[in-house]
Image: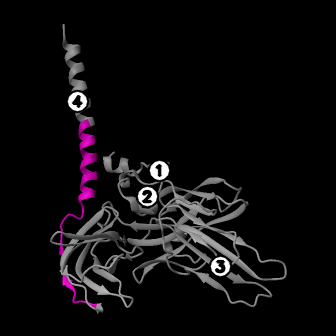
Amino acid sequence: MRIHDLLRGLLVAGAIAPATVTLHAGAIAPATVTLHAGAIASATATPHAGAAAAATTLHAGATAAATTGHTRENGIGIRLVDAPLQARADSRARRYIVDHLKPGTVIHRRVEVSNTTGSPWVVSLYPAAAEIRDRAFRFAPGRTPNDLSTWISTNRHEILLAPGARTMVTATVDVPKGAAPGERYAMIWAEVAKDPPPGGGLRLVNRVGVRVYLSVGGDNPPAADFTIDTLTAQRAPDGQQIVSAQVRNTGGRALDLSGEMTLTNGGLTAGPYQVRTGTTLAPGDAGPVTAPLTERVPDGPWHVRFHLESGLVRHTAEADIRFPAAGAARMAAATMDGGGFLATAVVTVGIVLSTLAAASFLLIRRRRRARHDAAP
């Protein structure tokens, strides 16, 4: 068996994924949603008999803003527990189900569903469609299916979670033998509902989920990569200074972009400033990624270093800019590094070196044993 095939089947079982989503299910409306990096939540209020108010939808069809940290408030949570061993250095693969599979392949991934409220909740679990549109990961309403969601099943469809309880659910992805190549997107949702009061009202349906990015193809997965083509200094109507990077997805996998930006001018340094997260580019897409400044700085000139990453793919671009009095300055052509796959190379070299070291150790032991057996 090839090392690649052997490693592919191994999982970092029980790895703590930093993506935990907590949903506040105790309120009627508006729903409060607490998010942790990497996951999605939506809340929909559906009118019932006697309700005069129109239906209210929060984050419908779009990703909700994500923040990092530990959950201190009560809610319903979901997180990915398993990740492929070969992707252990990829933080994106520890938050989402990200994989490349051949047609006819079956994989299993565990997610943990938790209830940190003081009340029991019935939680429904199901897959549903998602897509990348307008440079964002967007999910379909309700249980709308697509190809990928029909390939996903969970071993438990409804669970009763006591206050403070946690439970594991196994999701199975079964790729049909005749599946066409390409990347597909879906969600695995955990949903709770609060019935309206007697006499009518709003029935609040809340859900939190884990993204699924699945590429279907042959032995060699499509490479992920991107370019940073231009950097532009901007000033918002309220006076805030912003640097915008025009990014193009030149690879075969979707990108979830994050990073930071730094300004220098001789001995002066400003930043680093975090880029706005939430930009997802499908293969072939292009769009802006912005880094707003958190304090006012002189107009410049400045030398900007804009660092972006998606999983193991990382690039830094540089250019000279000056902030305009209003609007956007002229785009500055960016000079980009060539080290986008450094992290991937480090992981690959590490695996190869570990394999060679193990082989060398076994060979040395074998030679010593042979010498010992040959001794008089």
Q: In whole angstroms, how far apart are the C-alphas of marks 4 and 1? A: 33 Å
- State which tag comes first along the sequence, 3 or 1: 1
Mark 4 / mark 2, whichever is N-terminal: 2
Work out how far the residue at label 3 is from the one at label 1, CA to CA, in angstroms: 34 Å
Point out the tag, 4 or 1, that comes first from the N-terminus: 1
- Marker disc for residue 94: 2
Front label number (2 vs 3): 3
**Which residue type does callout 4 highlight?**
Leu
Inspect this view and state whether residue 81 appears.
yes
Image quarter (top left, top right, bottom left or bottom right) of the C terminus: top left
Residue 6 sits above or below residue 249 on the image: above
Give the residue pinned by disc 3: 30
Mark number displayed over residue 191: none
Amino acid type, label 2:
Arg
Q: Which residue is mark 4?
A: 363
Residue 225 spot, x, y in % from top left: 27, 69
Which tag is nearer the camera, tag 3 or tag 4?
A: 3
Q: Is residue 324 magenta?
A: no
Question: Which badge, 2 or 1, comes first in the chain's sequence?
Answer: 1
Q: Which mark is residue 15?
A: 1
Q: Are marks 2 and 1 in contact (CB under 8 Å)?
A: yes
Kind of residue at disc 3: Pro
Q: Position of residue 142 (x, y in %)?
A: 61, 77
Magenta span includes 332: yes
Q: Name which residue type carries label 1.
A: Ala
Relative height, residue 350 to residue 209 (above, below): above
Q: Residue at x 64, y 75 (%)?
A: 31
Q: Position of residue 34 (x, y in %)?
A: 56, 68
Magenta-colored span: 328-357
